[in-house]
Amino acid sequence: MSEYVLELQGITKIFPGVKALNKVRFQLRKGEIHALMGENGAGKSTFIKVITGVHKAEEGEMFLDGQKVDFRGPRDAQNAGIAAVYQHPTSYPHLTVAENIFMGHEEVKAGFIQWKQMNEKAAALLKELNADFKPTAEMGALSVAQQQMVEIAKALSTNAKIVILDEPTAALTKNESEELYRIVEKLRDSGVSIIFISHRFEDMYRLATRVTVFRDSQYIGTYDVDKITNADLIKAMVGREIKDMFPKPEVKIGSEVLKVEGLSRMGYFKDVSFTVHQGEILGLTGLVGAGRTEVVESICGVTQPDSGRVFLEGRQVQVHHPADAMKEGLILLPEDRQKEGLILSWGLGRNVTLPVISKYAKNSFTDEKKEREVSKQLLEEVDTKAISVFDLASSLSGGNQQKVVVAKALAQEMKVVIMDEPTKGVDVGAKAEIYQIMGDLALKGYAIILISSEMPEILGMSDRIVVMCNGKVSGELKRGEATQEAILELAMEKSAPVQEGVANNV
Amino acid sequence: MAGKSGRTLSITQESSWKKAVFSWEGILILLFIAVNILCICISPNYNLKNVLREMPKYLTEVFLLLPMAYLLLLGEIDISVGASVCLSATMACMACNAGLPFPLVLLVGLAVGTLCGAVNGFILTRFTELPPMIVTLGTQIVFRGIAEITLGSGGSISLTNTKQFHAMAGKIGPVPYMFFVVILAAAIYMVVLGKTTFGRRVYAIGSNSLASYYAGIHVQKIRFFVFTLAGFMAGVSAIFLTSVLYGANTTTGNGFEMDAIAMAVFGGISTAGGKGKLLGAIISAFTIICLRIGLGQINMNPQVILVILGALLVLAVLLPNLAKKARSMGIMAKAA
């Protein structure tokens, strides 16, 4: 019998244009709680999906109890005793708890579901977890914490030996997290091996004995939790020296262009204030879900804030629609370029000129020739890799699609350009090109807001960094004083174990 | 900072006669010719004069096809337009029988239709999460219900004074006025869709409404406008229908919405939005009209005609898929 209940070697997973996992390895001991950490996009989720059979790795081997296995689908993983619980429970809200627990492996006799038996079994599982709700309760009526408990019960109902928890505490309150810790520890004591993914250091310190770190789709290392300092762990998660990847030009920062004052939107962000100046790149960062995107969406009229004021060049502006924002000189390049940024079934040229067709039209009649010329010039300016302006947007790589989105902004006279995760899903080479464009825009006097979860990007490109945490601005750092550790400290929720571990790094 | 790599993009688009012939519109024109040849062969009475004489009652549906094509391109649908025709026609007839001056009668018909469309537009833009299919199914029942209540127990209304409506159904030579109006309307709709900023925005919203919204397009305003336009055209259709029928009853305009949708889809307009040309829809409309007239002339059972048209429609939506499959299989065979 092998020392490890689960072992993966040299796992490589390639998505079109992106290497999501690059020869990573992982070892899970029997009955341990093993934390898996890394930045957003480090490859954790993809890795989990390889383990659970959702994705098939291009290369690499996987061993269960020393036996080589090859999963062809989630069903195989489930039969082998692997179960996953996701951050947002993937449940059927209109069905009962018991139905959710036994979804896909109902208690059946001669084709009929055995309700009584199923409810009894579900009740037994819930009792084991000290749940305070009935198996016949409707799933949608439960809290997120309770739904997660159902998911764990579901994992147990398949007699799972390995349970994967993907950011289970992200949506939980402090007390609910404590309850979850108790359940997870109980699971471990009963001999289940657990992989625990979390952004919260508190979770890791509280539960895990070992931690494995991924960064940029690669395996960085596995450490004993009580032997590694917080500072070393953060360095392992983010540390990377590619300063020259960020051609940040020295720009003389001009007068204030955009000022946001006390912007609030119920349930998303509260009392957010900041300013951006001409030629300045303002980094806006924080963990996913901190409210960064929601803030800029409200500034640009995609959603309406409940209170707060927005000033442009000292004048208060009312923005109720993205069209209003563009009229004022504010443009948001949205995070999801395929859904929000581009019309994939259209040619590049038409995509670029879509916001400005009226500008070139005569008496509402479009001037296609002029549009083609304008779009050609703009697409060349951002160096788009394409053959003609008629190439479909869907035919380009992520990086080139992003360039088209930028060209769309250049087609108008803008003062503030807000880029939401401009390099998400973009490979390294194209990333550097996008940073170059960003620098050029700053040189031209645009005020730029860069939203990003990638530390090196934020540190490399920003003149100033505003960090958000739980919908509030938790701090502001100047270019000189910003470090990854300082940002992470501001971005993480304040809690005792984090405080004691972090080195004072200002 | 132009082109660091010196890469340039081409702005010329290759065009060829092959592409034009093998486009869906090209195939439809061939089909139109084929249908006419078929009709000439099977019916001795099938000639231009007779076709033009029988055409008006079918032409009223083309008025609905035009805005329906816009709606489908937006990714929307409106199945209440047939009921709007019924309600508009009923109200126009009542206005006429009440002795209102003729221009006012026309105005009543148009206003009622426009109002119906505006109600749809208002509901759907106010509550954007509602599916247009269900909302317009609901308003369809409401509009027809109101018409039936208005029509009372008899269920029909006849014009007491047909003089002016009769004049509307006049002809220039053998060609009815309505034909010219349809052609004019179709031309305007085609130019607006193909050449104006409004048309481009319609395609944009149908292709990706979220990206259009981020690009500063007033998506809800355009949706409201087009739903209202569909209502207005239902009013136009109602007036011309009244000029043919001299009255209205509870079944007036029944199924018009489905015929309009069928003509649009047969013409290559995708119900998923953003794809297709109005030209194709108009050719397909005339193809279907000619087939109906031809089959009607040889006294074919109307139900059988329906079966043929339905089968043709299914075939039309199936064809592009089959072609795609054949092509991908060809590519796979080459690769293997």
Image (cartoon, grey):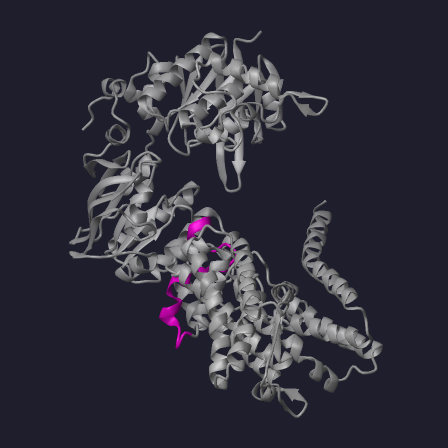
Q: Position of residue B196 (x, y in %)?
A: 45, 72
Magenta-drawn stretch, dominant element (helix, strand or loop): helix
Q: Is residue A349 magenta?
A: yes
The picture quadrant where one finds residue A67 is top right
Q: Is residue A262 left or right of residue B181?
A: left
Residue at position x 81%, y 71% in the image: B300
Answer above or below: position of A494 versus A161. below
Give the magenta range: A338-364
- Report if residue A277 is visible in the image: no
Answer above or below: position of A61 versus B228. above
The picture quadrant where one finds residue B301 is bottom right
Q: Position of residue A78 (x, y in %)?
A: 59, 22
Residue at position x 19%, y 23% in the image: A504
In-front residue for pair B291/B56: B56
In-front residue for pair B286/A57: B286
- Report if residue A109 is visible in the image: yes
Question: Which residue extends farthest front?
Answer: B153
